[in-house]
Structure formats: structure tokens, C-alpha cells
Image: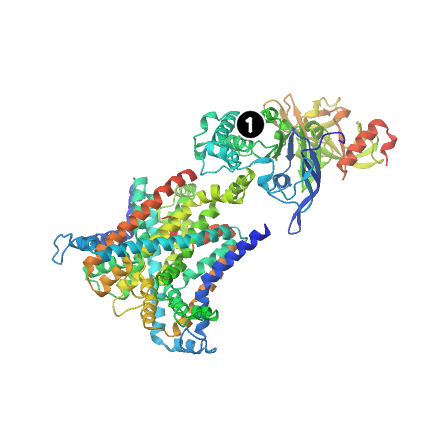
Amino acid sequence: MVKKIKWANGYLWLVFILLYLPIFFLIVYSFNAGDVMQGWEGFSFKHYTELFADTRIIEIVVSTLLIALLSSLIASIIGTAGALYIYNLKYALAKNIFLSLNNILLVSPDVIIGASFLILFTVMGFALGFTSVLLSHIAFSIPIVVLMVLPRLQEMNQSLVAAAKDLGANNWQMLSRVILPVISPGILAGFFMAFTYSLDDFAVTFFVTGNGFTTLSVEIYSRARQGVSLEINALSAMMFMVSLLLVLAYYIISTRSGKNKKRGTRLVLPASEGL
Amino acid sequence: MSNEPTPIIEFKNVGLSYDDNSVLKNIDFELEAGKFYTLLGPSGSGKTTILNLISGQLTVTYGDILFEGQVINHVPVEKRHMNTVFQDYGLFPNMNVFENVAFGPSIKGKSKKEIKAKVTEMLELVKLGEYADREITELSGGQRQRVAIARALANDPEVLLLDEPLSALDYKLRKEMQYELREIQQRLGITFVFVTHDQEEALAMSDWIFVMNDGVIQQNGSPEDIYDEPINHFVADFIGESNILDGIMTADYLVHFTGKDFENVDAGMRPNERVEVVLRPEDLDLTTVENGKLVVTIDDQSFRGDYYEITAIDDDGNEWQVQATNKSKVGERVGLTFDPEDIHIMRFNESENDFDARLESYEDDDDNAKK
Amino acid sequence: MPKSKQQRQLFYIIPYGIWLVLFVIAPLILLLFQSLTTQNGHFTLQNYATYFASGTYLLMTFNSVWYAFLITIITLVISYPMAYLLNRLKQKHFWLLLVILPTWINLLLKTYAFIGLLSKTGTVNNFIGLMGIAPQQLLFSNWSFLLVAAYIEIPFMILPIFNSLAEINPRLAQASRDLGANQWQTLRRVILPLSMPGIKAGIQAVFIPSLSLFMITRLIGGNRVITLGTAIEEHFLVTQNWRLGSTIGVILIVAMVITMVLTRERARKSSRNRG
């Protein structure tokens, strides 16, 4: 029994080390005095100072965050409306059709989404740039929100709705005072997911970004092909710390509201759920 | 107990704690083969913990558990000759009825033919012969219950452990299953250890009951013993309905409560020892004020089918539960009467051993009882 | 249907419906249309003929499927024990978050880290150099491509398996042991079949994106066009032959649908049993 536990722990450690090795590698080299990710030449903050002096990269970070924030916000609203619509459908067949349509973008390879959106924007005569990237991000975020909100609706106590009706609530009151509060954790989860998807997206953006506008992923891609400066390492180290803080904050919140604990972890990465 | 055969299961001073929280304390008992035992107690009393120790899902912190005389503290679950019927049944949802029941025999490497015969036999036993090909999701609660029993029995266990198996069923079905379980136990002649919080169930089914509270066995005995001679306030209160009053043993066979002395049949206490007096509602009779040993006022009455449940208040303000065959009027003053043998006396903090010793001693010799 | 309910549904379907038509249905139709027409808009099967007549494309298709298959198998073999062991930990939700955390690091950054780790003068070569092995060309090989792709996909495989394992009533493992099965038999006969939905979800979540990876092939696989994803990117953004690119896209979609059908059909059966 003891031996088994040791084996198990060894395996867990091994996988964790593999998962974090590249990330720590990046972070360690962000403090390298040298200019390449090969050969340690001593400790230095110089790549951080370079980073803060690089207005182009800071601009790109800001626009990446802006795209993420706007697209997830808008996707949350449209996705919630979509979830409500699907939830209200009476016939199982209609529900299934809408759900299948909803999931198309979720299961499609990024390359296909990017290529087909590129055709769409070109056919419509739409200039590529900030707006086309934003619209694409909204588009691929909506189905995630729907999938996060729908289970909340389905779990919603039916007598709640009946009671609100009985007490004379109109459509709008019913939505704002009864339904939205109940499903708000799902909307929040959807927003959160959409936000991280947008931040992380490379392929779709790569297709629809055009020449003038760029996001962080696309920028790193184009730099990585020429050989990157360790500035990017400094940036990744900082992004990692932010993610870590977010995760910790999230964990503390979700364990405090103990009841949601189980659901908590499910909302972090639903991409693979409900397909 | 010394001349009896080796007990099938024995607990020797067993205790269990989690992170310094003691869940079970100094548990000692022996179970004879072929009997129907019940562990009875409220939730959190430790009864399911004992069951899990027997089955091997939990391991003792101290003490020994013996199976047919051999210590089995560290024998893994799958190697023990017992099977469990779980409260939530624990049926495998990826298998149908047949596959569920066949699970144990197939693990043991039985041949297809043997497995088929065994499963058929077990499903017949629980009256589900026609249901072999059903999915678990297609079954009602009562049917799932039966599958769980068949599955546990298909392994030919020497001891069947049942963890509140009837608690999810409705009243009528529960009654039916009580009867059937008892019948199955007698037919197969194996030992059953049944866990429940339902005292009625325990009294109806068991050969022997262990009443548990706070991780301690409060009392064990036949259903009659436990009902008639509860050892303390907890047992008296938990098993059946009781009127429990403070009293003083003025002398042997004389107890003082509600301001009066009453003749009774208990002895062996210190003079003027403070005790608790138990009177069961069904032992009390209503009569006229003149004939009553006590005078009470009817406070409330509800019809229960075969009797009236009456709440009455005596002049000291004590509340009395009475089961009466005749209807009364609320507000009416009536007499309350009972026989000396209906009075049961409980001493404070008396252990089970002391209790048994006292009962034996004063029945032989009064003087010896004072120690 | 009462009028108010109709109004409500209309209110929900307008934004969601616009999204469905514009960003789900239209792009798919456009992609199909592109693949089936000539420059002048005439119907043609020429693109498909080109595709199926070309040994390069057929080999590439085979390669895509083969690599996606390998990536899926590797991640599955690593992830199942990981998900299983994680589930037995006390603070399992915290540890799961640590598995998910690397997915929040930009994909490009992680890929970029591997360039540093695997390059000829990189850390891995220095490390094996200590053991007296001459520096190897690790980067730009099929193995490095598989390694990085598997690394990226592991969390997406662990999560659905973890969720399906977490949903299994612990009582069932107890019951199995109680009926005489040892730990291994319990895993094989009870836990594994019950976690099948998670495995299928994981396969979907890994296999489909792996079919079309192009960024990793470009950066790690050595800028060779070896998968369908790279071919699509090449045709859309480099050679500007959208029609052939769309054709490959349609074929990729067909491959994706086949995967979905294969994994879903069996998933449905077990979900019926799961009730």
C-alpha cells in the first residue's frame, strides 16, 4: 500500500514537472543578462526595462486585452440570449438542432474558423483590422457562453419561475429579478472562459488580422520566426504571475463558497465538455 | 458465553479516530453465526462506522476485529467473507441487472454456467427472476434494493452487512422488505448485521440489538430486553415512546416521584438515590379521578387509528403521553393508573455490566446488591 | 403560445440568430462555395480533382490523421493515470487548477519556450551533453512536433477525464471491492467503463485540433507543410489559392465530422446506461 502511494506521487510529480518545465524555463531566462535563451550569463532585469520601454509591445498588450474584454462582454450578452432562447424551445428536436449549430464553432479547427471568416469578411467587403478581429472573437466565444449558461437554466427550480409568475412579475421583471440572478454564475463562467479563449487565440486572429493590427499571439509568432528577444520572456513571466494570482484568487473564492466547489473546476475549462 | 462456539465476528476494545476526533470508543462485542443483528442509533452515532470496520472499508485505530477467531484488522475488503448492501445500493450503472449480480462470481473466476445458475437463483430469491435483462435505470427504488441484496448474496458471504438499506423506500414497501429480509436471513442461515436509525425496524427484525450513541454502545440485548429495560435516558427515549421523570428510590421496591411514593419492582440502589423513572404510554390507563394513582388534565388528543394519543398534564406540570383506547375530552380531569411492574427505574451513569449484575443480584438476594 | 412569450423569444433570437446565420452558417456555405467554383463563379469539381489526384495532398491528409492519432494516444496514456491519481488527492480541485494553469499561458509562449529548450545549443542538449552525448538536432523533427503538441494538449485531455471520474459515485468502487474485486479489477471493470464519456470528450478535444495544427508545425516541425492545417494556412495566406485552401478545409471538416460520429455513437450508449 505504501509503495503504491509512492508510485502514484512520483507520477503526479513527474507530470507536474513536465507541465511547468517550459514555463519556468521561460521565466528563468527572462532574468538572463545575455540576449538568447541559450547559456546563462548572469542575473539581470534588463529585459524588463526593455519591455517597459517598448511602446509597440505595450500597445499590443493593451489592444489584446481590449479585444478580450470587449469580445467576452458582448459574447456573454448574446450567448445568454441564445441560451435563454434554446431553453425556452418546446420541442426536443428544435433544441437539438440549435445546440448542434451552436457547437459547430466549438468543435471546428481554428484554421477552418479563421479561413472561413477571412472569406466572409472579404466577400462582405469588410476591411481587416481591429473590428474584424473583435467580431471573430465574439463569434467564437458565443457558443462557450451558451454552453456555460444552459446547464444553469436547466438546473433552475421551475417553481421559482411559476412563483414569480404567480406573484405577477412581467417578462422583464422575471428576467432581471429571477432568472438572471440564478444563472449569473453561469454567465460569469462563460465570460471568464471567453476572456481566456480570446487572450489565447492565435490561429483565428492570424487569418483575419490584416496588416495594420496585431495581437500578442500573432506578434510573438512573427517574432519567434526571426528569433526572439528575451523581452518576450519578461512578458511571459509577468503574464504567468498574473494568471497564477487569478487562479489563486479564484480558488480561494470557490472554496469559500464551498457549495460551488465541484462546479468551480468545471467552469475553468469547459471546451471539452458538452461536445 | 464461555461454552459457546467461536463467535463469527468479535470486536475487542476497538476504537477509531480521525485527526484526534474519536468516532468510536472501546467497542466490545461478539456476534454468533446465523443471527440477525441490528446496530441501532441516530445518525452520527457510529453504527455505520462499525459496519465499515467489519467490511474492511475502514481500519481500526486501536483494538482488534476477529473473524472466526482470526484477527482481520488488515485484511483488505475484497478478501473478507462478507458483502454489503449499501444505503444507496451502489449498483453499477454500466451493467444491467444480470451483470450486476454476476459481478462477484465472475471476479472469482466462476464458469459461465455457474454464474448463470447463481444469478438466476439469487434473482429468484429476491423475486426479480424476470428482470435479469433490465437496465438499472429502468428499475424502481424497491427493485434496485432487491438487486443490491441479490448481488451481495451472490458471493455466498458468511456475513451480510446491510447499511440502512430500507431508508429510501416508502412505508409500505419498507414493511414488506423487513419481512422478506428476515425470511431470507432465516432461509440462508447466515449472519446479518443490519444498520438502521429506525427503532421500529430494529425491534421487528432483530434477534439482538445494539443501541449506539456518540460512538459508544449504550445497550445491547434482545428487542424485548431493550424495550422493557432501557438502561438510560437515551435508550428509553430513542426506543419507543416514553414518559421519563426524575425520581428518588426511597427504598428497595419504593420510588418517589410527582410528590408521591409508588410501589415498583426495582431494587439494588443506594438509599434515596436520585434516579429516572420510565413509564411507557401504552402501559398507562385512564380512569376516574378517584381510582387514579395520579390526577391529570387532558391537554391534547389525536386519533392514531388503533388508539388515541393523549397528552395530559399533572398537577406538578409534568407532561404525560398516554395511549388510550377510548376517546376523552380536552380539558377533562381524569385519573392515571399503572401497575408496579410498569415502572422502570434507570440509574444515572450505570454501565451495562453493572446493570446486568444488579438485576441478577437483587433477584437472588437483596442485601448483596448494596455495594 | 401566448403573445408575451413570443415577444420574449423574438428578443432573444435576434442577436443570437444573426450570429448563427452570419458566423456559423454563412462561413460554412462560403467555404463550400469557394471549393466548388471557378474564378468566374462556375460550378466545378476541379479543386477536388486536384486534391485527390495529388499524391502530396493525400500523403498530407494521411500524415495529419496519423499525427493527430499519435498525439491523442500519447496524451491519453499520460492523462488517464494523471486524472485518476488527481481524483484521489485530498485537495484535488486545487491540484486540478494547477494542471489547468499552463493552458492560461499563451500557446505561442509555450511553443517558444520549447524552441529554447530543444535547440541545438539549448538546455536539453546541454544536459545530455553532460552525459557525453553529442548535440542532437531535436528541433524541426517529427518527434519534437509530437512532444510539443502533446504537451499543449495534455490539460485538455486530463480535464474531461477528471470530471467524468469525479462524477463516479465513490460507492461504486467500494461496492466493487466489497464484491471481491481488487483495485486493478475495479479500475478495469467499473471505473474505466464509467469514465468512457470523459475519455471520448478528451479524444474529441485533442484529436480535432491536432488535425489542423499549423503554428506548431511551422515553429517546431521545421516550417514544413506536413499537415492539412499548414496546407490551408499556406493556400490562404501565402499562395493566395483560396479555392484549393477551401477544398482542403471541407475535407478537414469531413474528417472532423467522422471523428465526432465515431466518438459520439458509443458515448450515447453509455450515457443511456448512466441515466
Residue for point 67% across, 42% down: B215
Numbered disc total: 1
Q: Which residue is mark 1?
A: B177
Question: Could you tell whether B240 is left or right of A137 in the image?
Answer: right
Q: Report in which chain the residue with disc 1 lies.
A: B
Above or below, B224 relative to B17 = above
Residue C173 is situated, as x and y percent measured from the top left of the image, at: 52, 42
Residue for point 77% across, 38% down: B350
Above or below, B82 relative to A170 = above
Quarter holding the C terminus of chain C is top left
Residue B353 is situated, as x and y percent measured from the top left of the image, at: 77, 36
Answer whether residue C22 is visible to the viewer in this image. no
Residue B368 is situated, as x and y percent measured from the top left of the image, at: 87, 32
Quarter holding the N terminus of chain C is top left
Question: Could you tell whether C90 is left or right of C9 in the image?
Answer: right
In the rendered image, the residue lying farthest to the right is: B367
Residue C66 is situated, as x and y percent measured from the top left of the image, at: 32, 54
The three-letter amino acid code for the residue at tag 1 is Met
Report helix, strand or loop for mark 1. Answer: helix
B208 or B6, nearer to the observer: B6
Residue for point 38% across, 45% down: A169
Question: Could you tell whether C42 is left or right of B123 in the image?
Answer: left
Answer whether residue C256 is visible to the viewer in this image. yes
